[in-house]
Amino acid sequence: MRGKAIQAVRGMNDILPGEAHLWEFFEDTVQDWLRGYGYRGIRMPLVENTELFVRSIGEVTDIVEKEMYSFTDRLNGDSLTLRPEGTASCVRAVVEHNLLYGGPQRLWYSGAMFRHERPQKGRYRQFHQVGVEALGFAGPDIDAEQIVMGARLWRQLKLPDIALQINTLGDSESRARYRSRVQDYLQRHADAFDEAARERIQKNPLRVLDSKDPALQDVIADAPKLIAELDGPARQHFEQLQAVLLDLGITYEINPRLVRGLDYYNLTVFEWVTDRLGAQGTVCAGGRYDGLIEQIGGKPAPACGFAMGIERLLALMADNGNREPPQPHAYIVHQGDAASRLAWRIAERLRDAGFEAILHCGGGSFKAQVKKADASRAHYAVIIGDDEVSANDVSLKPLRTAGEQRRMNVEQLITLMHSIEEN
Ligand code: ATP
Ligand code: MG
């Protein structure tokens, strides 16, 4: 008896073959781009101790309050969590393996993240990020480098209209002064807020500035600005960052409301945003987190990083008509025992020569096989029947261009395919 069909978990998507090629193109581009800046890969587990995220992301944040997939390890009762982001895990790994002992590190990772959010376009419960972290660097030069990197990647992916917003959260002193000024201000407008937000004003007032609730936007717009609180070194850090951006012709907007949804940031924060994706417009976000390494138990060291949402970037790429699926070079059609044996050998020869070849499997008439060849988007059908076997050659039929079917031997086939590949 046929069982009831089982479906994927809500908010967790299959990436089907029709879109996988876009992912592969993105991943290839990203790897080359990261190599171009000297970043090295690191791969962390998908599951960490819950405490890691509570301590790094912060107790009073959306992620820790309501978005984590946490569960108890059945064997020892530990609380574990599917990673909601990569920075905490990456820093944990760097500390655990003493990577900073060998000097500063430029690292990157890519993979699935899990957050229990309300699924909608551009917002999923399993989604994917590429994360970039530079650890052990104190100066604004590395902040600038990471922003410059973003600008280059959007160019390489041919993504227009991604705008840069930057802000500074100051150092811990200016931030503490600012925190209490914002708290005072918000408290004076407390009647505009609901219960939960009022509690946030008490516990984490800066986070209230991050709210997307339309009813609060007026109050938030008039809140005091941190820039006014900045003192010497923090101001200088921000100015030096901007000097590099100006120098390289990277346009940006200072958004004083940009505070980011995690607690560990200080000084520089930035987001790349587009208005082509509706409400889920942030495609990449990051900033400096100088206190985090120490907070996780490492020797104090500064750091800066960012993460981009792959689904949102791919949605932009698709939106951009960037969608050509790959085309194999040849689809090999064959009938009869001797022909099939020759077909196997020729398929392997073509792959030896670096071509993508699909060998027809499953039999059927020549006519049906050529139909499959056409549907495969291959450039050519390589046809092998009894005639070809006795002459020890193949017939080549162009599928995408006009032209007659032609007989040739395998050497000629390979030479011809190379010459086509070069044009
Ligand atoms: P948002 O404000 O959209 O909730 P965030 O500040 O929570 O984003 P970060 O934690 O900074 O996001 O993650 C970096 C990037 O990862 C985001 O800019 C976005 O592109 C992507 N991202 C975050 N959450 C999701 C999600 N649930 N689904 C898809 N992409 C996401
Ligand atoms: Mg979020």
Image (cartoon, rainbow, N blue to C red):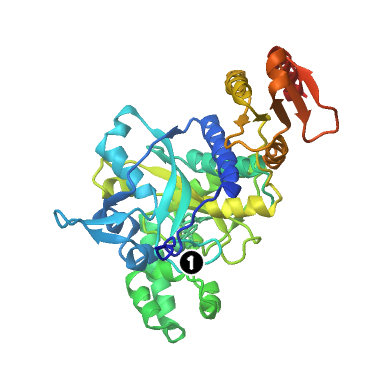
Q: Give percent across and percent down for residue 349.
A: 60, 18
Position of 110 compared to 392: left or right? left
Query: Is residue 415 visible in this depiction of the protein?
Result: yes
Q: Is residue 378 above or below residue 411?
A: below
Residue 165 appearing in the image: no
The residue that appears at 33% across and 61% down in the rendered structure is 69
Compared with 406, 294 (above or below) is below
Q: Which quadrant: the N terminus?
A: bottom left
| Quadrant housing the C terminus | top right
* Of 138 and 212, the residue lying toward us: 212
Crowdedness of circle 1 by 10 Å Cα count: few (<14), some, many (20+)? some
Residue at image coords 39%, 52%: 85
Determine which residue is flagged by label 1: 119
334, above or below 1, in the image: above
The amino acid type found where label 1 is placed reads Pro
Across and down, in percent, residue 38 comes to 49, 30
Give the structural element (helix, strand or loop) at label 1: loop
Residue at the image position 57 percent from the left and 37 percent from the top: 362
